[in-house]
Amino acid sequence: MKRALPLLLAGLATPAMAQSMDSPVDHSMHGTSYTPAPPAPVPQSPAPASDHAGHQLPAQENLTAANGEPVGTDQSPGSAEPPPIAHDRPADRYYGPAQMAAAEAAAMGAHGSASYTQVLFDLAEYQVRDGKDGYRWEGEAWVGDLNRAVLRSKGEGTFGEGIEHAEFQILYSRALDPWWNLQVGARQDFRPEPARTHAVVGVEGLAPYFFHVTAAAFLSHKGDVTGRVEASYDQRLTQRLILQPRVEFDLSAQDIPELKIGSGLAQAELGLRLRYEISREFAPYIGVNWTWKTGRTADYARIDGRDTIDRAAVAGVRFWF
């Protein structure tokens, strides 16, 4: 009994001690109270910036080094030489830079640019008319680079009656800008007779919306002043099918009775041709063409018993090489 009493008192004291350790200590009897300190705040990264619409903006990189000097794109541009141009040509593996530079200069020509050539027949067609059928051609050949020597020819005729109109031009074409060329030279008419020789000055190029335009003035050795304006547009319907409307206006500053040409607008032409490009260099086409003689030129045609309006269904081929 004497041994069990100390054990019982020790068992009762243990829960009381645990309770006093789990609860805050009250020091009110000494005039003060103990309050535990709040936990230290956890560091948080700053919230990402956003614009007025609430969209998150990308985080800005720190472009300042520890010593305050700018780094990266904040640095001012330098004046160091650019790195050498990287070539992926197989020949660079076997030949040195000097040999490759000499080969490039030879390929580009003595003046750093190559010379090119082209022969183009824009019209080479058979015309089915109300009366006798006929034919027509219009083409050019040139050699050069930006500035070119140009040979140009156009004409038409009637089967069984020979050539009604034929002309040949030799021109120097100089580039004014990426779109327009200034052309000067000479033109020789072989038909109709009497033949005429003309000085030529004109422009050729692409107007806005890719209208191909040619405008030229002619001064004959007889003092006659005439002009011509042509325009066409290639409307690509598919990768191979192209619809081309064409217009042409022939003008004269005076009456030329021996050539049956009146002053003002002598003749107007409208054509519509649909071509199919078998290849870019070869494209057959079909279409229709109308020609109107106006003013004094129409009067000359009536006196000769000719129509003032010509209509024709056409079939031909456009090709170049």
Image (cartoon, grey):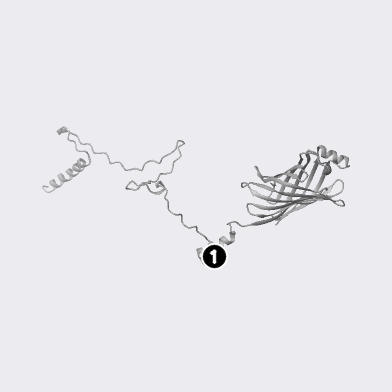
Residue in front for this viewpoint, 31 or 148: 148
Q: Is 31 left, or right, of 168 in this rendering?
A: left
- In this view, the residue in front, 231 or 110, is 110
Vertical position of residue 16 compared to residue 142: above or below: above
Say whether residue 159 is left or right of residue 239: right
Query: Does residue 296 show up?
Result: yes
Residue 166: x, y in percent?
79, 50
**Classed neighbour count for the residue bearing mark 1: other residues with Cα under 10 Å, few (<14), some (14–19), many (≥20):** few
Q: Nearer the viewer, residue 287 or 13?
A: 287
Where does label 1 land, which residue?
A: 91
The furthest residue to the top: 31
* Residue sticking out furthest to the left: 2
The quarter holding residue 280 reads: bottom right
223 versus 141 height, above or below: above
Quarter of the figure that contains the C terminus: bottom right
Q: Residue furthest front?
A: 222
- Res. 122 visible in picture: no
Image coordinates of residue 226 in percent, x first then y, are: 75, 42
Out of 312 and 112, give the one closest to the viewer. 112
Q: Residue at x 82, y 38 (%)?
A: 296
Is 201 on the left or on the right of 95, as rendered? right
Secondary element type, mark 1: helix
- Give how far across and how far down residue 56 sits, in percent: 44, 41
Instruction: Say how many tags the image has.
Output: 1
Dot 1 amino acid type = Ala
